Amino acid sequence: MTESPLEPTVTEDPEYFHQVVNCQYACPAHTPVPAYIRLIAAGRHTEAYMINWEANVFPGVLGRTCDRPCEPACRRNRIEKDEEPVAICRLKRVCADLRGDVSALMPDIPKKKNGKRVALIGGGPASLTVARDLMPLGYTCVLFDNQKRGGGMMRSQIPSFRLPEKVLDEEVGYITDMGVDTHFNQDVTSMKYMLARDFDAVFVGTGAPRGRDLDIAGRKEADAKIHIGIEWLANVAFGHVTSIGKRVIVLGGGNTAMDCCRTARRLGGEDVRVVVRSPFKDMKASPWEREDAEAEDIPMFENHVPRKFEMKDGKVAVTFEKVRAEYDDKGKRTLVPAGEAPVVMECDDVLMAIGQDNAFPWIERDIGINFGKWDLPVLDKQTFQSTLPRVFFGGDAAFGPANIITAVAHGHQAAISIDLFCQGKNLAERPHPAVTLVSQKMNVHEWSYSNDVSGADRFAVPHADRKKTLKDMKMEVELGFDVKAACAEAARCLNCDVQTVFESGRCIECDACADVCPMSAITFTENAAEDDLRAHLNAVSNNREQALYVSAALPTGRVLVKDEDVCLHCGLCAERCPTEAWDMKKFLYAAPKTACFTKTEKTEDEAA
Amino acid sequence: MSYIIPRFRHPCTAPNGIGYTRKDYEGALSTLCAGCGHDSISAAIVQACYEMSVEPHLVAKLSGIGCSSKTPAYFLRQSHGFNSVHGRMPSVATGANLANRDLIYLGVSGDGDTASIGLGQFAHVMRRNLNMLYIIENNGCYGLTKGQDSATADVGSKTKSGQANMFSPVDPAGLALNIGATFVARSFSGDKAQLVPLIKAGLHHPGFALIDVISPCVTFNNIPASTKSYAYTREHMSAADVVDFVPAAAKYGADGAIDVKMPDGATVKLRRLPDHHDPRDRAAAADAVMTTRERGEVLTGLIYIDTDHPSLHEMLDTTETPLRALGEKELCPGAKALEAINRNAR
Ligand SMILES: Cc1cc2nc3c(=O)[nH]c(=O)nc-3n(C[C@H](O)[C@H](O)[C@H](O)COP(=O)(O)OP(=O)(O)OC[C@H]3O[C@@H](n4cnc5c(N)ncnc54)[C@H](O)[C@@H]3O)c2cc1C
Ligand SMILES: Cc1ncc(C[n+]2csc(CCOP(=O)(O)OP(=O)(O)O)c2C)c(N)n1
Ligand code: SF4
Ligand code: SF4
Ligand code: SF4
Ligand SMILES: [Mg+2]
């Protein structure tokens, strides 16, 4: 708790306005979300696509599969009780679905190379992002992957009913078509050997490829009927497995379990059930993945800990102990026996989806690459450089399993580091974000953006007929928004990137802005310590994650405090200010990358 | 055109005692100049009525002509409204009040509407102690007609035209004290901490309550040479007391404040500030208004209050039932009754 009054906010630091754009700030790759949503509303899907592609590299894939950390962050959640976030992720899919030909917008790849060679080990989103960020600069990228095509787990794990192959092929293709020297079906078995070849830098993007097993009684005897989830999904993806027994038990409560059970339903599983150790509320699966599984008649059981497997007439009987979760003061959970009779469930096959681990058996331990906790490489958190200076890690290989958008964000950072490293520069001197801040005033009572935010509830993405999707492994379940629904959903966005910018020297303290603000977000007050201020604003402000804006001292000695937390970006404060002390300015923040890639990048303000 | 009030309000706005949120007391988005003091007064009225759990349908908003008189459109959307003729709001209010004493009468006027064209009606409604709250949104000029000096402009004060006013000003508070108003207050649009409790007290006062609110005209009368600007008013305000309004149900401890009991059980708590007069003493109040003015200050706060003086209805012994609720028999008692009245008058 600070005792002294707050210092005036430094809005010249781009990170201040960045954190006001909650969605973009929460996106690991800092995708300019409101900008692309406005372009979708304007029907300019190609440009919306390119804004995404620039930042997150796989808009078509992510528009279907992203973990969407942006959505829980969305301000729309907080402006009213029971409000839901804007469907940021599924709007991304709209611009991917409806985009025109983007080939002319793709970066030129220099014919004359810069003479630097970079090895990329693993062909998932992390490595592909590094390639995307380095190829246009003239690097030679040589990619090795032990699967038959690029995409990593996006191809081997994410089932095609969630992500059609065509969508993945296109977006992987944009990168490989840049002239990446790809070597598929090639397992890298020795880092020593890699380092001995003529590479200036090596990037490790091999993911977290080892599925966890459960060493309990009967495991060996039942081996033929027990499958490791991620191995099984990869076998399905590559056509090695095409059926499963009628009764299937999926062990685990994460997204892998959800993909396993839904895939099993499509390969012949009729009684497919998910059994979780923990209570439902602690399940790791995203709520929407769980809903989709439940909609396919897949029951779930909580608080069941598997204790033993037994083979009975060719079937597997799994014995579970019922437990109860107890939490200590710090919220740490222990599962204690509930004291009930054990539960036995019988099935034809068991899918084990209880987690993934990193595995680097192919990296020798005597070559200067240090490993730490959980056998993860010791890395610089910002540069992704390992203890061997020319080796970099990213994606699931860096800090353990996460998701695609995190792998992309790592890829951007690693590419910056590799570029700096190859040019002999200091890795700590990283490029800055590219930022613009432009007034949106067009005329009296007229802003360039629509502040007439829709009050509609979040629109649901329509699904294909379940009878058909359950029969066809490749048929995509979600149909995506059509243009009309996309516009209706886009109209729910608050335009949080259109910033309220205050110039204290102009303010005459007439109170007009404070009076008109529908969210009571503006208060003129004596400055005070943060806790005190937050408690005494015109509306209490409890969200400490969102900084308060504090002005310089005004003529009366008071300060203006704006609580950014629930600001609607409606512009009424600027509208009612007689002195233009407030203005609504669009803040475009492009996160640091090796360069800007989209060739003819039109700004949103240049009419289509 | 993107000039709209969003539908959302702060998620923590709680409903008041009768289940309404603040939004239920709002009106249309103001079309006054951005930064006009009048909008702050509207906001103060919204806040006071919301906090007091006033039933919006039991309020009648009355006004004359002027920017100030337009403001009833910007608060209490669900209340009755009458935007009358320039300077004639008091007579409309008198008629309405005599016809139905059950409503709360809230008059909003300007300094021109009140002290120039409307001075006569203003004086007489105060003499009669009509039960209403009369708010003057005082900016020293005719805002609506582009800023001519009004009757409350101080000698020497300049509007944007650059001409200094030559004529002696009408001080509405001073006039009110002289002519017998029973609740006289002054405040500033930029001081809601003071204005909101005054509005609450004025709405409860059982007779005529005047609040003269200095309310800068940001467009025509907010220059450094004006005595009704934001800056000048802030520098020259001198509060007589600190007012707190305590609703009937609330409990409070003895704290040395003057408690003025309202007939409906509410209390106005007044803490006199050092060296200030007793607001129950009319002569002392008039003297305080005069002497502070001579010092170049603007006396604010609750300057005078008398809750014992009978209101117009009591003085005339009129019917308690609103006329609309009376039957034909009571309203048209017939020739015999008229005959009796005439006989009495002979
Ligand atoms: C079942 C499942 C579903 C998922 N669903 C989603 C989802 O919906 N949304 C989401 O955001 N994330 C999802 N994820 C997570 C996501 O797939 C990963 O976080 C992401 O792909 C990691 O990217 P990466 O580039 O680090 O590595 P990966 O995508 O894992 O790619 C690594 C590649 O390297 C190859 N490789 C490994 N070792 C070697 C070697 N020695 N030599 C050569 N090649 C090698 C691997 O075969 C693989 O092709 C899911 C994961 C699983 C398991
Ligand atoms: C009978 C009549 N005379 C003159 C006018 C022109 N007029 C309109 S508003 C106004 C003055 C308003 O001044 P004030 O009451 O102070 O209101 P403000 O606009 O300053 O709030 C005048 C003279 C009129 N509308 N009707
Ligand atoms: S834009 Fe201005 S008026 Fe609108 S909610 Fe935000 S602070 Fe309030
Ligand atoms: S409306 Fe403008 S001048 Fe008036 S208080 Fe707000 S910022 Fe200051
Ligand atoms: S002219 Fe003056 S009084 Fe009228 S709205 Fe504008 S600022 Fe307010
Ligand atoms: Mg006026």
Image: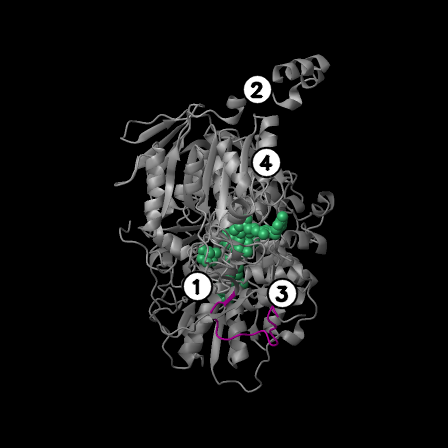
- Image side of residue A11 versus residue A124, left or right: left
Label 2 to label 1: alpha-carbon separation: 54 Å
Q: What label sits on residue A49 in the rendered view?
A: 3
Q: Is mark 1 within 8 Å of ligand 4?
A: yes
Foreground disc of the pair 2, 1:
2
Residue A559 figure quarter? bottom left
Of the two numbered discs 4 and 2 on the same chain, state the one appearing first in sequence.
4
Task: Name the residue that disc number 2 marks.
Answer: B320
Which chain hosts label 3? Answer: A
Of the two numbered discs 3 and 1 on the same chain, state the one appearing first in sequence.
3
Quadrant for the C terminus of chain A in the image: bottom right
Expressed as whole percent of the image width and height from the top left, the position of residue A184 reads 57, 69
Q: What label sits on residue B91 in the rendered view?
A: 4
Q: What label sits on residue A119 in the rendered view?
A: none
Magenta residue span: A587-605
Which chain hosts label 4? Answer: B
Task: Name the residue that disc number 1 marks.
Answer: A506
In the rendered view, would you say A508 is above or below A467?
below
Q: Amino acid at mark 3?
A: Tyr
Q: Amino acid at mark 2?
A: Glu
What kind of secondary structure does the magenta stretch mostly adopt? loop
Q: Amino acid at mark 4?
A: Ser
